[in-house]
Image: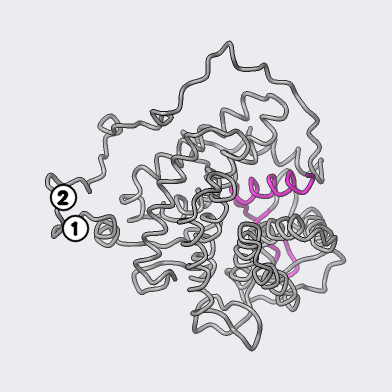
């Protein structure tokens, strides 16, 4: 996500959710979140049962080949992001909350491959910022950081996948406990007057929660049957509320009949991961059918591939970088699961459109609209683009 779009839940609701309401047996009250970091029992270090490696046991880093897709665009964007964009203790400027999710894997993937300590350090700073948001979850959910902490689970999970640091696994575990319990409070579909889920809509936002839970099980803890079951329950709830059986796609919200990109891309990811973890052929069939269902959104004005999104404009040729990034990620999962070459071919065609239409002067700009490139950009979306380019290269 590239704007404040996650669920905004008032403090009283989340406090009640985790068991510390005025009526609960919480004496002394344990639901207050300390605002002084020094008062925290754990200030972001590794869990107690994770021993620090002995320096003598750590093998020296051996650089390996790093050849991402679209290498010139990749190198230019990486250079501009890491030399020109201000970052304050892991909080990146102009990222619209996305950097917590995508800066860590974008930076770690290359940093670990090339033994670049500067890139690794920037990734760790960003992860520590997300870890701080998780520790202060109840406070964060009262303000604009709600989107950031929600989507930042992706960064924690992918960082664990790349580096194996148990610290990020523990932070993800805490985050998912909050998110899944919050989803349960709203019937496993994040849609209510007190929830702010625009401009993506409740289906996409709820789908991201389910996708993070599924990816956690795949990457962090394959034995977590409870999390797997909860993710599938949330996916089933989305089906009950937002599935348009006639059109064969998911609505962005129950009362919105138009075909839109974000909700269906989110559910493409959910059902592909669900198949990966359960082996249920119906899950993969649904994911592949959703790719077919979004084809009316594929625009004809380019020889590459670009998909229209209702994200924040009704202009017919509107194409946002963020929505193309998520679609590329979904196609990457589908490719891994099916081996069907059409998915990687389409992903490359989308990235070719990004290079030819959105990329300029060391950055991919926010969107295409009225036959012109936007005049502003999202740094978080560009980190996501870097990670897409890395994944696409295998």
Say if the magenta span includes residue 390. yes
Q: Residue furthest top?
A: 56
Mark 1 vs 2: CB contact within 8 A: yes
Given residues 74 and 252, the one toward you in this image is 252
Q: Is residue 308 left or right of residue 50?
A: right
Task: Give the residue at the far bottom of this rendering.
Answer: 246
Left or right of 203 on screen, residue 142: left
Label 1 element class:
loop
The percent position of residue 64, horizontal first and vertical second, equals 78, 27
Q: List x then y, in percent, for residue 115.
A: 69, 24
Asked if 329 appears above or below 239 in the picture, the reply is above
Q: Is residue 326 above or below residue 54?
A: below
Q: Which residue is mark 2?
A: 26
Query: Residue pushed farthest right?
Result: 303
Is 312 included in the stretch rendered in magenta?
no
Q: Nearer the viewer, residue 277 or 364?
A: 277
> In the rendered image, which quarter is residue 278 located in?
bottom right
Q: Please name the residue shown 61% across and 86% down the image.
A: 245
Q: Residues within 10 Å of mark 1 (few under 14, many from 20)?
A: some
Q: Which residues are magenta?
A: 365-394
Q: Position of residue 73 (x, y in %)?
A: 78, 44
Q: Quadrant of the C terminus?
A: top right
What whole-number distance in Å separates the C-alpha atoms at marks 1 and 2?
A: 8 Å
> Residue sitting at 48 percent across and 67 percent down?
234
Query: Counting other residues with Cα less than 10 Å from the Cα at mark 2, is it few (<14), some (14-19), or many (20 or more)?
Result: few
Q: Is 335 located above or below residue 101 in the figure?
A: below
Q: Position of residue 354 (x, y in %)?
A: 76, 56
Q: Residue at x 52, y 36 (%)?
A: 87
Q: Nearer the viewer, residue 91 or 123?
A: 123
Q: Nearer the viewer, mark 1 or mark 2?
A: 2
Q: Tag on residue 21?
A: 1
């Amino acid at each position: 996500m590239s704007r404040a779009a996650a669920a905004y839940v008032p403090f009283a609701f989340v406090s009640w959710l985790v068991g510390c309401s005025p009526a609960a047996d919480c004496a002394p009250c344990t639901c207050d979140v300390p605002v002084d970091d020094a008062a925290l029992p754990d200030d972001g270090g590794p869990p107690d049962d994770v021993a620090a490696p002995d320096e003598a046991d750590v093998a020296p880093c051996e650089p390996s080949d790093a050849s991402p897709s679209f290498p010139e665009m990749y190198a230019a964007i990486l250079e501009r992001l890491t030399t020109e964009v201000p970052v304050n203790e892991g909080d990146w400027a102009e990222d619209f909350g996305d950097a917590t999710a995508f800066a860590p894997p974008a930076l770690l993937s290359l940093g670990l491959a090339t033994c670049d300590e500067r890139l690794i350090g920037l990734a760790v700073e960003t992860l520590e910022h997300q870890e701080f948001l998780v520790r202060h979850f109840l406070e964060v959910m009262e303000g604009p950081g709600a989107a950031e902490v929600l989507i930042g689970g992706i960064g924690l999970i992918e960082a664990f996948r790349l580096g194996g640091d148990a610290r990020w696994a523990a932070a993800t575990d805490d985050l998912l406990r909050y998110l899944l319990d919050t989803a349960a409070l709203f019937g496993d579909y994040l849609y209510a007057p007190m929830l702010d889920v625009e401009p993506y809509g409740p289906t996409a936002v709820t789908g991201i929660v389910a996708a993070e839970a599924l990816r956690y099980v795949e990457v962090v803890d394959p034995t977590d049957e409870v999390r797997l079951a909860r993710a599938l329950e949330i996916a089933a709830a989305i089906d009950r509320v937002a599935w348009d059986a006639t059109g064969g796609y998911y609505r962005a919200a129950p009362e919105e009949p138009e075909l839109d990109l974000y909700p269906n891309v989110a559910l493409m990811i959910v059902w592909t991961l669900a198949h990966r973890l359960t082996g249920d052929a119906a899950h993969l069939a649904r994911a592949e059918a959703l790719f077919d269902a979004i084809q009316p959104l594929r625009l004809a004005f380019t020889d590459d591939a670009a998909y229209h999104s209702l994200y924040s404009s009704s202009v017919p040729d509107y194409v946002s970088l963020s929505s193309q990034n998520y679609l590329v990620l979904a196609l990457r999962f589908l490719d891994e699961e099916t081996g069907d070459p059409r998915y990687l071919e389409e992903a490359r065609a989308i990235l070719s459109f990004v290079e030819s239409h959105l990329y300029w002067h060391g950055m991919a700009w926010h969107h295409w609209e009225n036959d012109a490139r936007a005049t502003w950009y999202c740094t978080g979306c560009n980190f996501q683009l870097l990670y897409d380019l890395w994944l696409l290269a295998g």
